[in-house]
Amino acid sequence: MTATDQIGNRSADSLLRDRAAQVIPGGMWGHMRAAAVPEGYPQFFTGGKGARVTDADGRDYIDFMCSWGPIVLGHQHPAVEEAAAARWRGGDCLNGPTDQAVELAELLVRTMPSADWALFQKNGTDATTGCVTIARARTGRRRILVARGAYHGAVPWCSPSLVGVTAEDRAHLAYYEFNDIASLEQAVADAGEDLAGVIVSAFRHDLGRALEMPDPEFATAVRALCDRTGAALILDDVRAGFRLHLGGSWEQYGVRPDLSAYSKAIANGHPLSAIIGGDAWREAAATVFVTGSFWYTAAPMAAAIATLNELHRVDGPAVMRASGERLRAGLAEQAARHGFEVVQSGPPAMPLMQFVGDTGDKLGEAFCQEALRRGVYMHHRHNMFLGTAHTAEEIDRALDVTDSAFSALARRRG
Amino acid sequence: MTATDQIGNRSADSLLRDRAAQVIPGGMWGHMRAAAVPEGYPQFFTGGKGARVTDADGRDYIDFMCSWGPIVLGHQHPAVEEAAAARWRGGDCLNGPTDQAVELAELLVRTMPSADWALFQKNGTDATTGCVTIARARTGRRRILVARGAYHGAVPWCSPSLVGVTAEDRAHLAYYEFNDIASLEQAVADAGEDLAGVIVSAFRHDLGRALEMPDPEFATAVRALCDRTGAALILDDVRAGFRLHLGGSWEQYGVRPDLSAYSKAIANGHPLSAIIGGDAWREAAATVFVTGSFWYTAAPMAAAIATLNELHRVDGPAVMRASGERLRAGLAEQAARHGFEVVQSGPPAMPLMQFVGDTGDKLGEAFCQEALRRGVYMHHRHNMFLGTAHTAEEIDRALDVTDSAFSALARRRG
């Protein structure tokens, strides 16, 4: 759709929202519901190319959400799309997998030091839920330790909402504080003989608070506690996977999980998730029953192989780190120059900028709205995502916009 | 791969299985694991076209599994693939849905009398789990009644396996017998004030037993009990949906569910599932938090629109019923002529043939192996699936093969 689809002064997005309100509860579901972002954000899109997305009214944005993670090489990456298209032309959803299921598992095992095997699904939640099930299957125990406030998916055992959830859905969960070894030790002690696993995110990325990297001592302590008790160290690498380190996000701390959950960036936007694990957990992984109608489809696996090969080829994590550092340095300079105190947190490839003392996120919201109006799509409460399509030139163009956004904020304040 | 990929007398499939055994627990996961079908079935495929699939060794089969349900218009249906490809070229996984999310929801609402709204996911299990969550959210109650032996997905609350599952995962389930009104009434009475919903499959399709259509009185009784108690009637139409009746599989009984789960055939092999529901359940559906990284991807929605339009255009259910009846009549005649007593059950579009008194399914297994060897892919324990690509000519070709398979069985019997 383009601006010519607008009727009177109604935008295409607004007309679509009206239609959606009739046939989709609340107008949209889940994390992409526009009600969860400030006014002015589009709900509907028509396409993407490289680091850009286009909304239903034909407006282009330099995109710092990357579809909330999946797009790691930019939209419509030729090698990925060719690999997927070749597979679709042959047949995608068959009576079993193609050889690409094996090839992808082999590639993950070669890429990830903690992987001796892989299993494929569709949702990140499928992978985290599968890890918990495998942990319980092998240990014969029930208790799973979860960092308070961490997001591990959107089904009753882990959903951030308790609506429609029963107490029993979480009967065997207990909580620790991320980066707080004492709280984890206490939770391990409380679990006694019933500890099946500890699930931990690659870093702390709870919505609305500053991102927090793991203290290497904390990461080491999680490993040691799991080794001592025989519980599974489950790394939820769904959000961070393939952006920080291709070998797994805790490789940089020398800590190897027993089981890891991947999704989002694994196939540059094609629907796929994966559980990877070590040999000790292989038999349990073979005995649990996990499946889905589309878990064997070949095109997303072909896309994943192409994505991983490209990330290896260009050293994707290094490219994204450099771009993220360029963005961060620019934003820091601009904030200081315009007289704003900001906190930038998280790994450079998955940044978040917040204003100090920003009650109700009002400044963050206004800043992102000003940027959006000028063609840069950012988020004020959720970590953002960079991809390899965020070249230095795109970052610099985005920084021109954020400079104007800071100016506008300064004028409003003034 | 083709036969030229074979090394010595090893088949490509066997070589791939050896590689898979190294990097995939048990060599493969879930319902497409070749260990679950008789010897001789291929594990790996290379493609599909119309009613045919091709295995990793280049052997073609007339396929009566249709990828275990998803393929309802034949593989590589031009209208569906063009719609999906057009969407991929524009961009598929964006920062929000495209207008196709709205269009598809509108189309489902127009097509299904019980639908006032729709929500989209990836797995059938996402849809059944979402229905249960919505039922609990609206009623504020917990108990869900499930037919004993029914399959509603592969996560701990409903998995057919108890490995890695805790008692609490099923704390609020209770069981009734499909088609047994008294058992359902008893389960409703036992639930007392805590009854949130009754989940029921379109027909009874438990693995390994004769398929059983719902008694219309049973269907009516489920509706009446839900009306009386305010519980949700949840139709799990994941497996049967779009094959029996485009308006929903219980339309033929005049029974309309409160919430229904769809997946499999909805997009002719593209990964998508849907919850549809009535207005009374809309607010609850808007308040539960259900989401996934790929739940907004546009290409499967474009494929679903094309699939539903094509199913309407050709009257897909009528085509599949006629083909299924042709197959059934042919098999009945052949069985009688070769001196075998068989039971054919289920709706013609989703048939199952079993041999009477077939201890350990030995005859069924041998029959399917003989058919497979001759280029017809059938299943002896799980309902099969027809699609609109099963023309009368394809059915007749398949019947030539099954006639030979019966002959071979008769010779073996001596």
Image: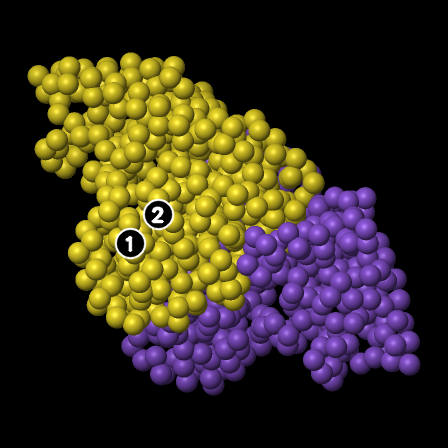
Chain colours: A yellow, B purple
**Nearer-N-terminus badge (2/1):** 1
Residue situated in front as seen by the camera: A322 or A354? A322
Judged left or right of residue A353, residue B377 is right
Q: Position of residue B205 (x, y in %)?
A: 60, 70
Disc 2 to disc 1, how far (Cα)?
Answer: 9 Å
Residue A255 is marked as: 2
Q: Is residue B365 above or below residue A148?
A: below
Question: Callout 2: few (<14), some (14-19), or many (20+) C-alpha neighbours within 10 Å?
Answer: some
Q: Quadrant of residue B378?
A: bottom right
Q: Position of residue A90 (x, y in %)?
A: 70, 40
Residue situated in front as seen by the camera: A310 or B175? A310
Judged left or right of residue B413, residue A151 is left
Same chain for mark 2 and mark 1? The answer is yes
Q: Quadrant of residue A197?
A: bottom left
Q: Position of residue A215 (x, y in %)?
A: 23, 43
Contact (CB < 8 A) between labels 2 and 1? yes
Residue at figure coordinates x 26%, y 40% from the top left: A213
Residue at figure coordinates x 28%, y 38% from the top left: A382
Q: Amino acid at mark 1?
A: Val
Judged left or right of residue A86, residue A162 is left
Q: Position of residue B218 (x, y in %)?
A: 52, 77
Residue at figure coordinates x 41%, y 81% from the top left: B187
Please say whether residue B230 is visible from this viewpoint: no
Residue at figure coordinates x 58%, y 77% from the top left: B215
Residue situated in front as seen by the camera: B120 or A232? A232
Secondary structure type for disc 2: loop
Classify the position of the C terminus of chain A by image quarter.
Answer: top left
Question: Callout 1: few (<14), some (14-19), or many (20+) C-alpha neighbours within 10 Å?
Answer: many
Q: Is residue A52 above or below residue A178?
A: above
Q: Chain of mark 2?
A: A
In the picture of the structure, the residue carrying the numbered disc 1 is: A222
Q: Amino acid at mark 2?
A: Val
